[in-house]
Image (cartoon, rainbow, N blue to C red):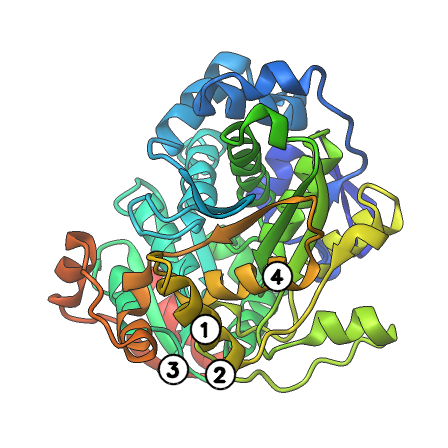
Amino acid sequence: MQLVNLKDATQQVSFTTAVKTGLGRNQGVFFPKQLSKLENIDALLEKPFVERSAEVLSHLIGDELPKDTLAEMVASAFNFPAPLKQIGDKQYCLELFHGPTLAFKDFGGRFMAECIGLFNQGERVTILTATSGDTGAAVAHAFYNKPNVDVVILYPEGKISLAQQKLFTTLGGNIHCYAVEGSFDDCQALVKQAFLDDEMKEKLGLNSANSINISRLVAQVCYYFEAVAQLPVEQRGNVHVSVPSGNFGNVCAAMIAAALGLPIANLSATTNQNDTVPRYMASGEWSPNATLESLSNAMDVSKPNNWPRVETMLDRGDFDKHEFYSRSVSESRTQAVMKEIAASGYVMEPHTAIALEGLTLDKTESAVGICLATAHPAKFKSSVEEVLGQEIAMPSVLQDALDKKCLAEPMKADYTQLKAAVFAKLL
């Protein structure tokens, strides 16, 4: 798999190097130079999830990883289901919250942990990542107690749900958490600054577990194949997928799946009130505003890291730009959608409701719609209960975390403070 740095085309690396490096020169993200179609998609869709996923990843990664080794990695990482639930006429919801931290990022986090364990061969590595909600827990649990690995997680203080926070700030051990006074974009800026610091990189063996890392991105491609595989055969030809979008990694994975030949005809990258991309699509002007807090806090991102990857695919024709939509959904409309779908017996948290609204706004009558449920409603228990006026059952994994003490340390959005704290703890 040959990847190129989208900010410095002279830096071209293998999959292994991209995974170990995380972020390229000039803070550029790595992306495949080209994508080729898979053969016989119909036959592939008839295979079990893990077997099919190993084939998809083998096609993407190439001969860098032996097929047997990759199959073992996938079997270990994807040891939970991704069921497709029908919620209306030709309308479905892909539930991606059945992993250990009840969010879609378990897929990417666990596969990345498999890759790092294989590639680093005992070398010390420090995973530095920012989270707007679910990445922190997925990465923390994937790497918890892994030998020769420390994880440093930055999150915006008071701007993620308590359940999200407690899932990773209560672990301790090799998981080190900092509550940053600021927004997710502030946390992300600190991570980027660290990757420009040679001393940090050399002494700590820095890597990132955000969707910046290509291993997380390719892992997410697999569940789009699983979604289409669960559709009735006669409904697979005209599929419209709507993805709740903050950092735009998830919808990028959907685009890659389509470029490989999966019959996704249309894509909606639906955002909350942090609408940088919808405005850019309408005006051609990239003008991020200050990040606004919302019910869908994991999407409170004004400067999405994965947008260069999405735009690259649109520009080079990997996905038809005329079939790509991006709209902003207001807070009031998000709540209304949650109430409407709850009346039919299906409970959604805010991110999923935004994806469903994307289908409502963009899908043609003849298309089959799939929206992504990226997190369990109980991860947003208080806000969901307030909107719906009904109690949400708490899964035991969340209740256990809520009962534990938060071990995170407070920090200003200051790089000097971050560097000093991390060096004091890890060196």
> In which quarter of the view is residue 235 placed?
top right
| Disc 1 crowd, CA 10 A, few/some/many (<14, 14-19, 20+) | many
The amino acid beneath tag 3 is Met
Q: In this view of the protein, can residue 293 be seen by the observer? A: yes
Q: Which residue is mark 1?
A: 297
| Position of residue 362 measured from the top left corner of the image (x, y, whole percent) | 70, 59
Q: Is residue 421 above or below residue 11?
A: below
Marks 1 and 2, how far apart at CA: 7 Å
Considering depth in this image, is 30 or 363 the residue closer to the camera?
Answer: 363
- Is there CB contact under 8 Å for labels 1 and 2? yes
Q: Which residue is mark 4?
A: 360
**Mark on residue 293?**
2
The amino acid beneath tag 2 is Glu
For discs 3 and 4, the disc positioned in front in the rendered view: 4
- Is there CB contact under 8 Å for labels 1 and 4? no
Looking at the rendered image, the quarter that the N terminus falls into is top right
Residue at 33% across, 57% down = 345
- Lower position in the chain sequence, tag 3 or tag 4: 4
For discs 2 and 3, the disc positioned in front in the rendered view: 2
Considering depth in this image, is 212 or 413 the residue closer to the camera?
Answer: 212
Marks 1 and 4, how far apart at CA: 22 Å
Residue at 23% across, 72% down = 390
For discs 1 and 4, the disc positioned in front in the rendered view: 4
The amino acid beneath tag 4 is Thr
- Lower position in the chain sequence, tag 4 or tag 2: 2
Considering depth in this image, is 412 or 241 the residue closer to the camera?
Answer: 241
Marks 1 and 3, how far apart at CA: 20 Å
